[in-house]
């Protein structure tokens, strides 16, 4: 059931094919370098790209721009307490600002941070502190065809092996990302979160949940975890988040806003340390790098994110999109996530080796054939890691309609038909930080 009607529209255009060819070359075959005006359907990310509700626009108008003691910040505090269950909030300009504040507080040189799977900025922030980011995905996370319900879970077996290898004293931080974005947006069970909490207690580590898509994860928990089949989304979210010592949040996902993030905790000592670091990097603790109006809109968005009609509309749209791509013959990672459809570029282009960046070749072909922008999350984005050659087609919230997805499917079918002729790519430039090279590196067609 569609839960919305449109109150504002934006004109978009599909550039001619020869123009798209020139755009690709000028962008160094990196779609981050494209102008948004040259993109027809933009599935690069769901981060900050969605449409806000009328209630959120009203909050923008009412936002309090006071430097200190803002009313809008009080509204955010109330929303975080009501929706997520945490009393202390440190606002930041976006999620990576929250990562800088929290991980910069918790990590030192030589430490090890465990995560079900680190996302790119998380991995970079951990590394920037001189610490080692170690992934602990369950084995089935790398099986695109498995229908296991919680492929995003944290592997305690892998984590204990790391403890045996480096020692308890080297691991001050355990992170669980829900949903698990780098593992194809897969869901994480509440039972797994409980067990990770117990593990963190065993090794005396701080347990952090990256809660960017906490509401989408709660929706999957109700569908797939018997204990919660009759629970409300709001109750599931509070239960799962409540096992953490702290949260790091990008409001640009399940905060339903275009800017903003925060750290939340009930640990008063940790709160004070994060607040001091945030003053240095983000701003005063009642605005944290955001305008007051954006703080107010995020307070509204957090409450809307656990609305069941919204979540059903959101997740069913993504599910249907994935089903259409699979029916067209594309290798879709299953089960479909809540925020994106992931394609297995390695399966689509078996003639391309990982060093030829099959995922990046796929995103370039989707743009070349239909002006569609996605993002590679394989060997280009995550060098020196063992993971599938995935391409993410992230769906902005409350933005696109059936006709847009039909166009993407038709574009993907065209790529599928010509797949044997697609050539690989190679690096033409390589930035100094490999963890985030995919944002700026340029490529070129691989010479034969």
Image: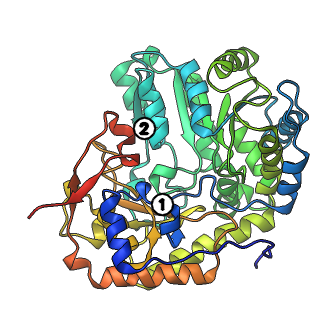
Q: Is residue 280 visible?
A: yes
* Residue at x 61%, y 23% (from the top left corner): 281
Answer few, some or many: residues within 10 Å of disc 2's Cα (few below 14, many 20 plus, some between 14 and 19). Answer: few
Q: Is residue 42 left or right of residue 293?
A: left
Answer whether residue 329 is visible to the viewer in this image: no
At 72% from the left and 73% from the top, the residue drawn is 9
Residue holding disc 1: 35
Looking at the rendering, in which quadrant would you find the C terminus? bottom left
Please report contact status of discs 1 and 2: CB closer than 8 Å, yes or no. Answer: no
Q: Nearer the viewer, residue 171 or 87?
A: 87
Label 1 crowding class (10 Å Cα cut-off): few <14, some 14-19, many 20+?
Answer: few
Res 111 quadrant in image: top left
Residue position for label 2: 157
Q: Position of residue 7 (x, y in %)?
A: 81, 72
Q: Position of residue 221 (x, y in %)?
A: 66, 57
SS at circle 1: loop
Q: In the displayed structure, would residue 7 be above or below residue 194? A: below
Q: Return the residue nearer the eye: 231 or 102.
A: 102
How far across and down, in percent of the image, does residue 115 sit? Answer: 48, 37
Quarter where residue 267 is shown = top right
Q: Where, quadrant-wise, is the N terminus in this rendering?
A: bottom right
Q: Residue shown at 43%/78% (left/top)?
A: 370
């Amino acid at each position: 059931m569609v839960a919305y009607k449109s109150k504002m529209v934006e004109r978009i255009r599909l550039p001619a094919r020869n123009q798209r060819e020139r755009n690709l070359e000028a962008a160094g075959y990196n779609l981050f370098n494209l102008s948004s005006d040259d993109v027809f359907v933009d599935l690069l990310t769901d981060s900050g790209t969605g449409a806000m509700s009328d209630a959120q626009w009203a909050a923008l108008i009412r936002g309090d721009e006071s430097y200190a003691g803002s009313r809008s910040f009080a509204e955010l505090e109330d929303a975080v307490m009501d929706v997520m269950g945490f009393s202390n909030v440190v606002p930041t300009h976006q999620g990576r600002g929250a990562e800088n504040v929290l991980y910069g507080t918790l990590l030192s040189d030589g430490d090890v941070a465990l995560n079900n799977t680190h996302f790119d900025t998380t991995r970079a922030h951990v590394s920037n502190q001189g610490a080692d980011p170690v992934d602990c995905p369950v084995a089935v996370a790398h099986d695109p065809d498995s229908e296991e319900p919680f492929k995003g879970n944290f592997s305690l077996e892998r984590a204990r092996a790391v403890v045996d290898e480096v020692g308890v004293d080297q691991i001050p931080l355990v992170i669980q990302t829900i949903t698990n974005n780098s593992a194809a947006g897969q869901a994480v069970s509440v039972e797994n979160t409980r067990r990770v909490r117990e593990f963190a207690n065993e090794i005396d580590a701080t347990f952090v949940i990256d809660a960017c898509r906490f509401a989408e994860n709660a929706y999957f928990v109700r569908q797939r975890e018997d204990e919660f089949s009759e629970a409300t989304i709001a109750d599931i979210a509070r239960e799962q988040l409540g096992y953490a010592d702290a949260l790091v949040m990008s409001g640009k996902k399940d905060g339903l806003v275009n800017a903003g993030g925060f750290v939340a905790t009930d640990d008063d000592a940790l709160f004070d340390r994060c607040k001091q670091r945030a003053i240095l990097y983000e701003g005063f603790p009642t605005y944290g790098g955001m305008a007051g109006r954006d703080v107010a809109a995020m307070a509204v968005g957090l409450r809307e994110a656990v609305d069941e009609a919204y979540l059903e509309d959101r997740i069913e749209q993504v599910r249907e999109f994935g089903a259409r791509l699979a029916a067209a013959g594309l290798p879709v990672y299953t089960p479909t996530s809540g925020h994106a459809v992931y394609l297995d570029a390695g399966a689509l282009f078996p003639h391309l080796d990982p060093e030829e960046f099959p995922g990046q070749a796929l995103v370039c072909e989707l743009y070349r054939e239909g002006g569609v922008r996605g993002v590679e999350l394989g060997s280009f984005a995550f060098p020196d890691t063992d993971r599938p050659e995935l391409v993410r087609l992230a769906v902005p919230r409350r933005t696109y309609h059936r006709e847009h997805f039909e166009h993407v499917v038709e574009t993907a079918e065209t790529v599928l038909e010509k797949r044997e002729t697609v050539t690989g790519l190679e690096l033409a430039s390589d930035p100094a930080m490999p963890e985030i090279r995919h944002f700026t590196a340029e490529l070129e067609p691989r010479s034969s």
